[in-house]
Amino acid sequence: MAEMETRKLLHDPTELITRTIQPILWLGIFGEALSKVRAIPTHGLTYLQFITPGILTQSVVFIAIFYGLSTLWERDSGILQKFLVTPTPLLALVWGKMASAGIRGISQIIVIFIISLLLGIKLNFTIFAFIGAVLIVVLGAGFFTGLSMIIAALVKTRERFMGIGQLITLPLFFASNAIYPIAIMPAWLQFVATINPLTYMVDGLRSILVLNSYASLPFDIFFLTIATFLISLLSAYMYPKVVM
């Protein structure tokens, strides 16, 4: 399934081009505007440096969260039923979807690197930084892909899924440290941020790409690994219920 996704991207890279629009808007307009205000504490970083990992995370989450929509499309076209009658373990099917989202997420790392160079945003352009970013993006994409497949199994229609997908992604994005520090949030929102996997994606990417500090990186990766594994188990359990 991951190979199939790679072939799709190579055959028709149009989606990769359209996916660049969102980070360009966030960094080129929103980021540039707020960087002039200087109202948000960024601890020695420029505001564009601060939000770049958050915008990368947002781009990956928006890709992954709609994999549930493709699951519903596969059901409607009869492909999902063919997957389910094969001897392939359900967990392998779910991991295949997660890996597919991870491949698309890796393309967003390259996009963010290019945009950062064009806008003069200072990031760590090293092999280690790229490999670390790939690991975090793949884990994060896997988590939100699993979440989207669970939602698809519950709502069962593409129309409902579109509304719920938007309803989930935006609150998760704003309830994280993507565009402002957790310290300036109200207490109840700080609690939400500490259990939000998106927060650990942003924190890990910020440590690697901007801060060049790895003190919190092991815990970020550990949290994402456990969260992704647990949600893959639940997603594998729910996967057949899409056709019920």
Image (cartoon, grey):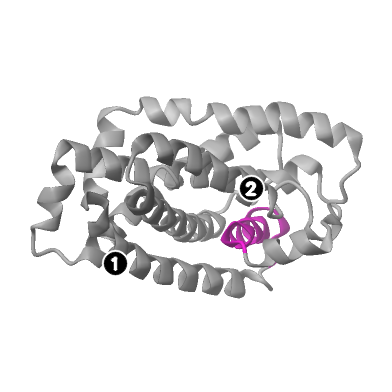
Which amino acid type is marked by label 1? Tyr
Q: What residue type is labelled 2?
A: Pro
**Which quadrant of the view contains residue 13?**
top left
Element on which disc 1 rests = helix
**Direction from residue 152 to residue 171 in the image, left or right:** right
Image vertical order of residue 63 relative to residue 198, above or below: above
Across and down, in percent, residue 32 comes to 77, 30
Q: Percent position (x, y) of residue 74?
A: 22, 41
- Res. 1 visible in picture: no
Give me the C-alpha separation between circle 2 and circle 1. 26 Å
Q: Please say whether residue 203 is one of the residues in the magenta stretch.
A: yes
Q: In the figure, residue 138 lies in which quadrant?
A: bottom left
Closer to the camera in the image, 89 or 32: 89
The answer to if 210 sits in the magenta stretch is yes
Question: What residue is disc 2 on?
Answer: 171
- 95 with respect to 30 (left or right): left
Residue at horizontal 75%, vertical 40%? 48
Query: Residue 237 versus residue 232: which sits nearer the camera?
Result: 237
Image disc number at residue 223: none
* Residue 2 appears left or right of 151: left
Which element type, helix, strand or loop, lies under badge 2? helix
Q: Give the magenta range.
A: 196-213
Which residue is identified by label 1? 237
